[in-house]
Image (tube, rainbow, N blue to C red):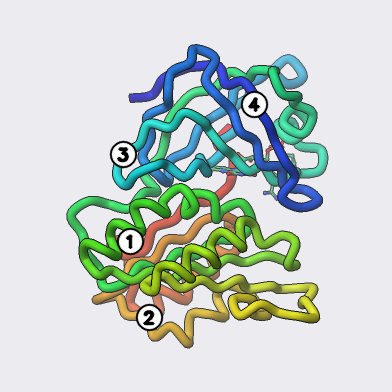
């Protein structure tokens, strides 16, 4: 059920130069029900017009399945001249935002057990997968499902939550993690860091529409290009799900 509520900023930190991780609590003190992969909307007025922007919930719930989270975490990538960017980059602890949610169906579905999920993201598009980690652990333990997460960024600093995903991969052998770095290669690459774009990882994965389900989240150009390549391999909307980070104003 969609609810309207105010979110008060508790604390925040910069994940890199232009991405801010913000942690909110509901002003009414209630937890927020959500399914990992869903997003909230923030409501604000800009130059006399009502505006809404969407942000994926990054909170890692305490257990698999539908969650009730006490803190609503989001990661905001700053867009030059952006209206929500101006608001969210200046927000101070204790200040509140009008919000609603949760929205969206970019979630792991019940009643399906592919051999493998391939989770693909660029930029802040990786946040829904962070929220899915308990459910991912559950599906690996319960069904032996494998997961392959590929995150694209321009440089190492922009690989969001990289240490967390690498640590999760370390303790969960069914989970593989790759960061694809497109522009500025690190001198001392970690085992999970590779040069190139997320789509470059596809060939080596031996993708199979009979056994794999693919999730794509983030930059619309990446998603369009990936979808074109995946269609050539026989993927259809049945086994290929996408969330494009374009505003629905
Ligand atoms: C379902 C969904 C989930 C989303 N989740 C997230 C999330 O978790 N984190 C996050 O940071 N964003 C997310 N977004 C994008 C977010 O909703 C805003 O669109 C984004 O923050 C820009 O808003 P803004 O008001 O700052 O910029 P706007 O005022 O909307 O745009 C300013 C200018 O920048 C251009 N622009 C807008 N977006 C981009 C872009 N990505 N790259 C380049 N130019 C752009 C616009 O065309 C415009 O000219 C999501 C979008 C959707 C639809």
Disc 1 from disc 4: Cα separation: 39 Å
The label shown at residue 207 is 2
Disc 3 from disc 1: Cα separation: 24 Å
- In the picture of the structure, the residue carrying the numbered disc 4 is 10
The label shown at residue 96 is none
- In the picture of the structure, the residue carrying the numbered disc 1 is 237
Callout 1 crowding tier (Cα within 10 Å): few <14, some 14–19, many ≥20: few
Question: Mark 4 or mark 1, which is nearer the start of the sequence?
Answer: 4
Residue 211 lies in what quarter of the image? bottom left
- In the picture of the structure, the residue carrying the numbered disc 3 is 66
Q: Nearer the viewer, residue 208 or 166?
A: 166
Instruction: Say which of marks 1 and 4 sits in front.
Output: 4
Q: Residue at x 40, y 79 (%)?
A: 232
Q: Nearer the viewer, residue 46 or 123?
A: 123
- Determine the quadrant in which ligand 1 lies: top right
Question: Mark 4 or mark 3, which is nearer the start of the sequence?
Answer: 4
Instruction: Say which of marks 3 and 1 sits in front.
Output: 3
Instruction: Decide if residue 8 is on the left or right side of residue 89.
Output: left
220 lies above or below 78: below
Instruction: Decide if residue 94 is on the left or right side of residue 90.
Output: left
Element under disc 3: loop
Q: Quadrant of the C terminus?
A: top right
Callout 4 crowding tier (Cα within 10 Å): few <14, some 14–19, many ≥20: some
Disc 3 from disc 4: Cα separation: 24 Å
State the residue lying farthest toward the front.
171
């Amino acid at each position: 059920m969609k609810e309207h509520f105010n979110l008060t900023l508790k604390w925040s930190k910069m994940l890199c130069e232009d991405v801010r991780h913000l942690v909110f609590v509901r002003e009414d003190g209630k937890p927020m029900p959500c399914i990992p992969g869903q997003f909230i909307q923030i409501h604000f007025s800009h130059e006399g017009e009502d505006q809404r922007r969407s942000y994926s919930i990054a909170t890692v719930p305490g257990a698999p399945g539908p969650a009730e989270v006490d803190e609503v975490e989001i990661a905001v990538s700053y867009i030059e001249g952006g209206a929500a960017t101006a608001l969210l980059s200046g927000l101070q602890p204790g200040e509140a935002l009008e919000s609603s949610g949760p929205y969206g169906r970019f979630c792991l579905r019940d009643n399906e057990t592919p051999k493998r999920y391939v989770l693909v993201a660029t930029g802040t598009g990786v946040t829904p997968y962070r929220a899915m980690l308990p459910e991912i652990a559950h599906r690996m333990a319960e069904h032996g499902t494998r997961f392959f997460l590929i995150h694209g960024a321009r440089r190492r600093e922009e690989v969001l939550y990289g240490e967390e995903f690498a640590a999760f991969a370390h303790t969960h052998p069914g989970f593989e993690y790759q960061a694809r770095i497109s522009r500025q290669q690190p001198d001392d690459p970690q085992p999970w860091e590779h040069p190139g774009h997320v789509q470059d990882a596809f060939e080596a994965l031996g993708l199979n529409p009979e056994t794999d389900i693919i999730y794509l989240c983030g930059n619309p150009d990446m998603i369009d290009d990936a979808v074109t390549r995946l269609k050539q391999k026989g993927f259809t909307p049945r086994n290929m799900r996408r969330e494009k980070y374009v505003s629905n104003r």
